[in-house]
Image: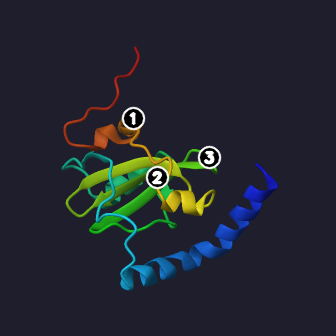
Amino acid sequence: MRFRDHLKKFFWMVATPFFPFFRDTARFFGYKPFPPRQEFHIGYLAEHHDKNSFFKFLSEKGFTINRIAWVDDDEILSVRFLESFEYQYHLRLFKDNEVRGHHELTPEFSPLGHLKGLGAVARTEKFLEFIGECLKGHCPPKMER
């Protein structure tokens, strides 16, 4: 990792506790950089899961609470899986059990690139590998025998 990336990591380590305050203040004053729900629909949570069991499942796969993220309307859970300092898989769960997710730049690596959605892509198949068994109408990937 480059020295500049270490500085960015340090900055975000200090800034992260304050981020929700600034995000929520911006929302209060009408700043809306994204639609009510961002793109990249993946599916709906299966009936045998709720927010807590889904979060436990995701935690066991290496997902963590996404503390540096915009909050979409009706969002009840936002988690991420860090692929590297530069990229993450970001998942959201909504009140109606819809799951959306995308692969994107981390806000720590590129705050403006992240905010502008540069490089954000669906990667639906990868998400299904992560969470397919938790979604309605999906089966876990077949195991090699």
* Foreground: disc 2 or disc 1: 1
Residue 23: x and y, percent? Answer: 46, 77
**Sequence-first tag of 2 and 1:** 2
Residue 9 visible, this orientation: yes
Does residue 20 appear to the left or right of 135 in the view shown?
A: right
* Foreground: disc 3 or disc 1: 3
- How many numbered discs, if any? 3
Quarter holding residue 129 = top left
Residue 129, numbered circle: 1
Q: Residue furthest top?
A: 145
User: Looking at the picture, which amino acid does disc 1 mark?
Assistant: Glu
Residue 84, numbered circle: 3
User: Looking at the picture, which amino acid does disc 2 mark?
Assistant: Ser
> Is 12 rendered above or below residue 20?
above
Residue 143: x and y, percent? Answer: 38, 22
Q: CA distance from mark 2 to mark 1?
A: 15 Å
**Mark 3 Cα shell of 10 Å, populated few (<14), some (14-19), many (≥20):** few
**Sequence-first tag of 3 and 1:** 3
The residue tagged 2 is 59
Residue drawn 40% across the image and 77% down it: 31
Residue 107 visible, this orientation: no
> Is 2 rendered above or below residue 22?
above
Residue 29: x and y, percent? Answer: 39, 85
Q: CA distance from mark 2 to mark 3?
A: 17 Å
Residue drawn 44% across the image and 57% down it: 79
User: Looking at the picture, which amino acid does disc 3 mark?
Assistant: Ser
